[in-house]
Amino acid sequence: MTTHPPTDIPRIRAALQVAAGNMLEMYDFMVFGYYAAAIGQAFFPSGNAYAETLKSFATFGAGFLMRPLGALILGAYVDRIGRRRGLLLTLSLMAIGTLTLTVTPRYAAIGLAAPVIVLCGRLLQGFSAGVELGSTSVYLAEIARPAHRGFLVSLQSASQQVAVIGAAAIGVALATMLPDATMRQWGWRVPLLAGCLIVPVLFVLRRHLRETAAFAAQAAPPHLPEVLATLRREWRVVSTGVMMVLMTTISFYVITAYTPTFGSGVLHLSGRDSLAVTLCVGLSNLLLLPAFGAVSDRVGRRPLLAGATIAAILTAWPAMSWLVASPSFAHLLAVEIWLSLIYSAYNGAAVVYLTEIVPPRIRTTGFSLAYSCATCIGGFTPALCTWLIHVTDSRAAPGAVLSAAALCGLAAALVARPFRKTEG
């Protein structure tokens, strides 16, 4: 059957089904970010902790370079075969990438093959992720009632916070039960194994999804040449989307994936305290994102986008400077929760707005391409912060990165307009 669910409850049920798969992508990314130092030691040993961590974060970021390619190839494919089948395909590819990182032996066991295999697994994850978030967001936007679209699409971002919470909770438990040496040796593989074990459940959930009415109503799905021609014609929309998403991706990775490394490696707090802060950030985002998605349905997308970016521009650097001047668990928690509030307000409006400014006929490809190009930059946020702190000797450097991203987001908010043209 290829119609929208008839009432709001089935819509929400379908939203949870599709968002659950999206959770796996972010779970894998969070685990990699949380244990970047241990992964660097396992696959990029050099005897220098800074070099190992930087190489690990560079590998983390390399997966994002594949996203635009995945957005074009898989996005065009999904725009042709349908949203539901595309969601099953991306879940399968993500699972293969997760399994690769989980089972690859250390550099000490197989030499150069280890980092090569890990890099290939990350590239496959990136290729798949290039369209996973786009497919999820577009599916939710197309099954939602217009008056509730912001809320329903925000469940995609909220599902990512479940991944943040789950990965951080497992990390706190492991840090409590296992000594640091064991965690560096093999303990970091346990959260990845847990991700592999939930794949069959997620696959079953997605198999029962219905196709969206918007896709079913198309007389003939677009072929790749038509998709590429439309993208060329709508390059301004895609460019605006890239600037809009930069704020989302950079702020997200600063307050989640980078926090454990920043807290323990830069502020010299305990690993457990840093993961506990990340857990609290995930809980904060989980509660705030749907709330701000619903607010965007009431007050509009642009007021939230502008307000959140202005708040980031004015406060990100002062907040980070205050934190590094007097680092503590309480101060790190306070700054991260404030940044979580800004991120949630912005993201609650930005993701749904991106689905609304892209032409419907290439909605998956256009959304995914804009998002993927932005994450090519945003995905390197942990590496960029690590490098900036090293070369500037300023531990508050992540605040400058956030402010620059917010400037891009504000510019996008001022020029973006919903797509209005009726396609013939």
Image (spheres, rainbow, N blue to C red):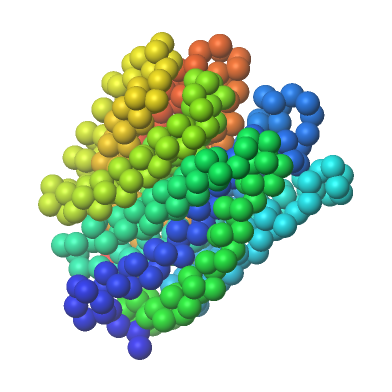
Q: Is residue 18 above or below residue 345?
A: below
**Which residue is nearer to you in this view: 185 or 322?**
185
Q: Is residue 314 above or below residue 149?
A: above
Residue under the point 59% across and 69% down:
92
When asked about the image quadrant of residue 256, the answer is top left
Residue under the point 72% across and 57% down:
103
- Left or right of residue 409, residue 299 in this image: left
* Residue 388 in view of the camera: yes
- The quarter of the rendered structure image containing the N terminus is bottom left
- Left or right of residue 389, residue 357 in this image: left
* Residue 246 in view of the camera: no
Residue 196: x percent and y percent? 59, 63
Residue 151: x percent and y percent? 23, 57
When asked about the image quadrant of residue 23, the answer is bottom left
Q: Is residue 6 above or below residue 335?
A: below
Residue 188: x percent and y percent? 63, 46
Residue 83: x percent and y percent? 43, 73
Residue under the point 27% across and 69% down:
12
**Which residue is nearer to you in this view: 121 or 329?**
329
Q: Residue furthest bottom?
A: 1
- The quarter of the rendered structure image containing the C terminus is bottom left
**Which residue is nearer to you in this view: 36 or 378?**
36
Give the total of numbered labels. 0
Residue under the point 22% across and 47% down:
292
When asked about the image quadrant of residue 403, the answer is top left
**Which residue is nearer to you in this view: 305 or 51?**
51
